[in-house]
Amino acid sequence: MSVTIVGVFDRVDYAEKAAREIKERGLRTDDISIIVKNHDEQEGQSGEGMTNDNISDGAVTGGIIGGLAGLLLGAGMVAIPGLGIIAAAGPITGLIGGAATGGIIGGLIDLGIPEQESKKYETDIREGKVVFTMRTEEDKVEDIRNILQSNGAERVNTH
């Protein structure tokens, strides 16, 4: 059975290092998503009226999520009304792109994370944390949990 494992990190480079280690161990990286708030945006900017087209600047994205763009599918910037500009990589990018249908919370729910937990992860993102998700089979959860923890995850949960 497939589950979603979630790690919360203080820094993007910790999450990136964990993703690289997962890849080096031969595990599938197509189902990894990483979400982080863009701290470079101007204070007070809500992201309303912005589209992926006018904020998906490769240089900006590269500065926030570093080498993840080459490691994970679908790296880009997404404007979430009330939250601001979010840098995301992996399958979550397409899921949160329709902010009107739930934004980050809706995207996390689509990945199999309960609504209450999804709200907590959105709060983590608001506070500057990095949320790492990965769909995987139950028999790989312990290996992935160990990788996330050894790379600095503050907490790791399975849903």
Image (spheres, helix red, strand yellow):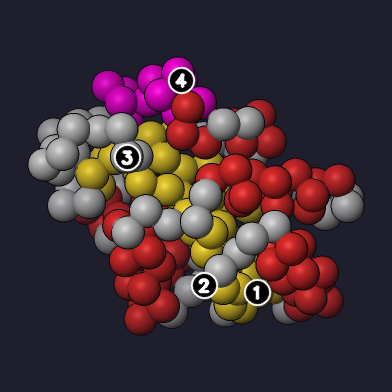
User: Amino acid under label 2?
Assistant: Gly
Q: Considering the numbered disc 1 on the image, is that residue within a helix, a strand or a loop?
A: strand
Q: Residue at x 54, y 45 (%)?
A: 12
Q: Which mark is residue 3?
A: 1
For the N terminus, the quadrant is: bottom right
Q: Local crowd at mark 4 within 10 Å, few (<14), some, or many (≥20)?
A: few
**Place of residue 58 in the rendered image (x, y in percent of width and height, measured from the top left):** 46, 20
Left/right of residue 16 with respect to residue 129 in the rendered view:
right
Count the marks: 4
Provide the residue span drawn in magenta: 52-62
Magenta includes 108?
no
Categorize mark 1 by other alpha carbons within 10 Å: few (<14), some (14-19), many (20+).
some
The C terminus: image quadrant: bottom right
Q: Which amino acid does label 3 sit on?
A: His
Callout 4: SS: helix
Task: Relative to 6, say whether 131 is above or below.
Answer: above
Along the viewing direction, whichever of 78 and 147 lies nearer the viewer: 147
Q: Name the residue under label 2.
A: 112
Q: Where is residue 54 in the image (x, y as percent from the top left)?
A: 27, 22
